[in-house]
Amino acid sequence: MRKLTITRPDDWHLHLRDGEALKAVLPHTVRQFARAIVMPNLKPPVRSVAEAAAYRDRILAAVPAGQQFEPLMTLYLTDNTSPDEIVSAKASNFVKAVKYYPAGATTNSDLGVTDIRKCDRVFEAMQQLDLPLLLHGEVTDRHVDMFDREKVFIDRHLMPLQQRFPRLRVVLEHITTSEAVQYVVSANNIAATITPQHLLFNRNSLFQDGLSPHFYCLPILKREEHRSALLQAATSGNPKFFLGTDSAPHSRNSKESSCGCAGCYSALHAIELYAEAFASVDALDRLEAFASSYGADFYQLPRSTEQITLIEKTWRVPDEVPFPESPLVPLRAGQEMTWQLA
Ligand code: NCD
Ligand code: ZN
């Protein structure tokens, strides 16, 4: 039986929700990860340092007794975020970044930014104070094809943004295309997170044996050539690419619906999913740096000193796990996996 012991990983892009949903999903993340960058797209979103502090307290209160976990908080950028809030965020020491959602791009993004240039004063403050900007990098223009939204965002918004603020540190979140990989490799002061679903699946999975809502997330799965470019980037040893699950819990009812929510649930078995992806190209020796080193280095935080062990062993992903309104269906529900967290 092969074993793999690595430094305990961190999740650099995670949705934890709130209330009973938070209590249902947090133990899964805590079992795997030392820390996580917690997304602010609650309803209403986490827009101030005071709201982030209160949310952080609710997360800490939901950590199972005797276990360790550090939530790293983010603020949700709006047209009205003030440069003063950025000063407070930096001083807080627990707000580690600011998240940009284009208005209407994804779940709970109604209060997102309507025009990225409206935030230039905020970006100036972030550049000055060295507080990273996390981007949901998709345009919402209805004339742009769903599958081209990330590529168009890079040309239309990201390149001009980096020209205006060359020293602002940016993370292009949950990248899905070869164009994003190429851009991140070539530009300065930019890194990217990559999810397990975008490493393991292409857009065929959305339509395999009928419409499959549990593979629907945003940005949407792309062609095989993009999946393979992402897997190449993740396993390349380039520190600009690191782990961010984008685990985004939505109940079965809200996914299996005439207007289903976007999001894949992977917190249950995230590191195992990444292990499968890395093993598929014989790159398990690169997993530790991607999962446990490069993200901490980007955020200028110490690497974790704990370890986890993965065992090569066949097991079946449960069909569902408990969640408030109706159960959660994890990514690859009911299917066999070959690596398991000990
Ligand atoms: C996320 C969610 O549900 O909060 N959904 C998703 O498909 N990734 C929002 C997001 O990150 O886009
Ligand atoms: Zn997300």
Image: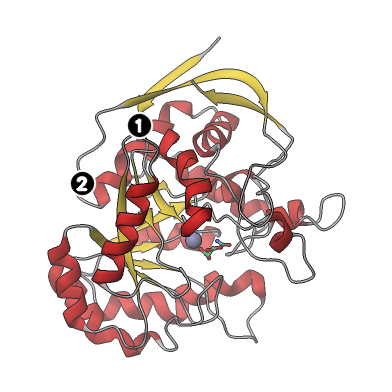
Q: Position of residue 335 (x, y in %)?
A: 73, 34
Tell which of 25 and 89 is nearer to you.
Answer: 25
Q: Quadrant of residue 223?
A: bottom right
Q: Residue at x 39, y 59 (%)?
A: 184
Say which amino acid is labelled 1. Answer: Arg
Residue at which label 1 appears: 8
Q: Residue at x 71, y 66 (%)?
A: 260
- Asked whether residue 97 is in view, the answer is no
Q: Separation of disc 1 and disc 2 at Cα? A: 14 Å
- Taking the view exactly as shown, the residue that stands out farthest to the right is 209
For this view, does 308 lie left or right of residue 49? right
Label ID, residue 301: 2
Q: Position of residue 90 (x, y in %)?
A: 16, 66
Count of all numbered marks drawn on residues in the image:
2
The residue tagged with tag 1: helix, strand or loop?
loop
Marked residue nearer the N-terminal end (1 or 2): 1
The residue tagged with tag 2: helix, strand or loop?
loop
For this view, does 263 lie left or right of residue 131? right
Q: Position of residue 13 (x, y in %)?
A: 42, 54
